[in-house]
Amino acid sequence: MAAQPAPPKPARLVAFLGGLLATLLLVGLFAAALVGWTMYGPGPTPNGRGDTIVSLDSGSGVSEIAGKLKRAGVIRSADSFRLAAKLTGADRSLRAGEYQFKSGASLNSIIQMMKSGAVVRHFVTVPEGRTSAMAVRILMAEPLLTGKVTTPPEGSLLPETYEFSRGESRAAVLQRMMDARDKVLKQLWATRAQGLPFNTPDEAINLAAIVEKETRLGEERPHVAGVYINRLRAGVPLAADPTIIYGISGGEPLGRGIRRSELDSDTPWNSYKHAGLPPGPIANPGRASIAAVLNPLVTKDLYFVATGKGGHAFAATAAEHDRNVAKWREFEAAQKAREHPDA
C-alpha cells in the first residue's frame, strides 16, 4: 500500500493548539479545584480538639496573624492564609480580638470571621444594690480576668454589665465601673430638681443606695425617693431597714428579720434613731435609683409599707399608714396560714 501523505501543516497546528488548550483547561480546572479546596475545604482539627481560642493583638500584621493561626493549628499554611487574605482584600480589614474557631473550619470561614470582627465577647454583671465587697467577689470569681483588687469605697461603682477581654485585669474592669458611675452621676446631677435637701453628688448617692435597697420596682423608685426627700425636709428619721442591716453585717443578707434590740441599738447606721443621711452609702445604686433621688416624685407621703405583693402602700398620715400596716399584717397572717395549714 502506498504511504499516506502527511497532513497539511495548518491541520497539524490546529491539532497542537487544540491539545494545548485542553491541557491548559485541565490545568486551570485543577488549579481552580485546588484553590477551591484550599479556601472552602475543611481545615485542620488541632490535636482532635474542639473549638480553638486565638487572641489577636491590635496592630498585628497579616504575617503575624498567619503565624499565630498556624501555631495554634487552625490553618495548614501561613503562606496560603497570607495569599488568600491578599486576593480577597481582607488583608486590609482583619480585626483584632479573641476568636473561637471551630475544629475543621475552612480558610474562607476563618478569614470572613476575622473580616467581620466576629470576636468572642465576655461580660461580667454587678446587679444594682450590691455592696462594693460583693462587686469585688463577682470580679474575683470571673476566671478569665487576672490580678487582684482591693474593695473600693461604697457607692463608687455603677452596677451594670461590662464587657471585657480574656486576660484583662480586674483592676481595669473595676476602674471602668467607677468611671461609669462618675459619668452617670455628673449627667444626672446637672439635670436635678431644684430645692433638694442635700448639697453634693455624694449625698445623692447616699440616699439613692437606700432607695435601691427599699424597692425592686422601677416605677416605685421616684415615689420612695419622694418619701425620703419629705422626711429629710421635715428633719425626721428616715427609718430605713436597709441601713440597720448595713450596720449589722456590712450589707450582707442577715437570713432573718431585724431584731428589736437591733432597732433600738444606738449606732451611726440606725436611721430610726438618727435623722438625716447615714454616714455613707449602704450599697452601689443603679442609674434609675440615682435619677429617682435627683428628680423624685412630688408627693406629700411620709410613709410606706410592703404590700406583700412586691410593691408598697404609701401614706401621707400616720393614721393612713397604720391602716396599711394592718392590711399588710392581715395579708402576712393569711399567707402563713396557707403555707402552714396545720400550725
Image (cartoon, rainbow, N blue to C red):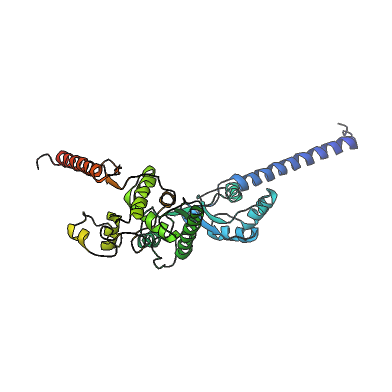
Identify which residue, 28 or 174, lies in the foreground. 174
Looking at the rendering, in which quadrant would you find the C terminus? top left
Residue 141 in the image: above or below residue 9? below
Residue 73 in the image: above or below residue 8? below
Residue at x-position 23% and y-position 43% = 319
User: What x and y, as percent, mark residue 229?
Assistant: 37, 52
User: What x and y, as percent, mark residue 338?
Assistant: 16, 38
Identify which residue, 176 or 219, lies in the foreground. 219
Outermost front residue: 234
Outermost top residue: 1
User: What x and y, as percent, mark residue 332?
Assistant: 19, 42
Residue 159 in the image: above or below residue 175? above
Using the rendered image of the protein, determine whether residue 185 is visible from the camera's viewpoint.
yes
Residue at x-position 65% and y-position 52% = 93
Find residue 235 and report its image quarter: bottom left
Q: In this view, does 5 lie to the left or right of 54?
A: right
Using the rendered image of the protein, determine whether residue 165 is visible from the camera's viewpoint.
no
User: What x and y, as percent, mark residue 9?
Assistant: 90, 37
